Amino acid sequence: MTTTEKPSREYVDDLCLRYRRWGKWGADDQRGALNFITPEVLVRAAGLVRTGRIVSCALPFDENGPQSGRFGGRHNPIHTMLQDGGDIALGAQDHMAELRFTDDTITMPLQCGTQWDALAHIFHKGRMYGGHGLEHVTSKGASRNGIEKVADGIASRGVLLDMPLYFGVEWMQPGQAITSDDLAGAARKQGVEVRSGDIVLIRTGQMAQVRAEGTWGTYEAGAAPGLGVDSAHWIYENEIAAVCADTWGAEVQPNDTDDVFQPLHLILLVNAGIHLGEIFDLEALAQVCRSEERYEFLFVAPPLPITGAVGSPVNPLAFF
């Protein structure tokens, strides 16, 4: 499936049209490729729970996250207590009989940590998934393709493709692109057959790299390994329901297109209707997959049902 065509703007436009699914599931569809997760797919996925091990793929939501404001002014979560032990000690709650409580709040960009991109997150030529225009995302949020439209579950068979394992390295290098042949090769090496309705998690090892180096560096907006334009063929043809990665934008940075920023977001999210997950922590998952000697699991990662949101933080769970 690998192509030798130059990934130019014209080529990206061609793939956008070639892989467009607008109307495939009806004019009112707001789920996109998640429609591939049929009841039969989910029932089979539930059968993968055998040993009872659970792995979270989320970073902690705190001030130690990767954000520094480089991209869109995103900052790390700000956690504030509304009522704490000091309030109790000072008698601020003495008007209540016996019971005392603590309460808190959080301020955060919805896409500052482990998160899903909603189908309303990206526009191309003035249109988001389904052909809906800019007027559908206002200061009040998204009236079409908001993240709440898929709040009843992003859950299916999960498949981890461990790309450093495939390449025989500790972690991939920034700027290294993953092709369709690479994805197919990794699946073969790991002995896993990808199926329609799967959620594919792509480990590049960048999380391992920043931990080894002891700094986030430019993780949240800089050079990164990731999916190249060519990977769109494998992802589309295999009817993948959603794609997650351990980098800030899932795609290789710098992009392998000179004249299109984040081309796979245009091809996969806007046109093929594939939800993209970013900043997933896949290190513990990779270790468990190796110890379990399998790279498939029940994967449950529903977004928060924030009305009109174009993204959502998430605590993705893999069940073995």
Image (cartoon, rainbow, N blue to C red):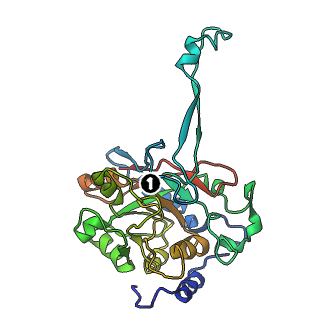
Identify whether 179 is placed above or below 53: below
Residue shown at the point (55%, 85%) measured from the top left: 9
Residue shown at the point (31%, 71%) measured from the top left: 186
The image shows residue 14 at horizontal and vertical percentages of: 56, 87
- How many marks can you see? 1
**In this rendering, would 124 be left or right of 225?**
right
Residue shown at the point (60%, 84%) measured from the top left: 17
- Amino acid type at circle 1 is Phe
**In this rendering, would 137 be left or right of 3?**
right
Quadrant in which residue 28 is drawn? bottom right
The image shows residue 81 at horizontal and vertical percentages of: 57, 29
Identify whether 148 is placed above or below 86: below
- Between 84 and 164, the residue placed more toward the observer is 84
The image shows residue 221 at horizontal and vertical percentages of: 47, 62
- Between 66 and 269, the residue placed more toward the observer is 66
Quadrant in which residue 223 is drawn? bottom left
Q: Say which element carries label 1.
A: strand
Residue furthest out toward the left: 168
- Between 54 and 216, the residue placed more toward the observer is 216
The image shows residue 99 at horizontal and vertical percentages of: 60, 13
- Between 121 and 305, the residue placed more toward the observer is 121
Category of crowding for the residue at label 1, using alpha-carbon neighbours closer than 10 angstroms: few (below 14), some (14–19), many (at least 20)? many
Q: What residue would you read off at disc 1?
A: 299
Q: Quadrant of the N terminus?
A: bottom left
Residue furthest out toward the bottom: 5
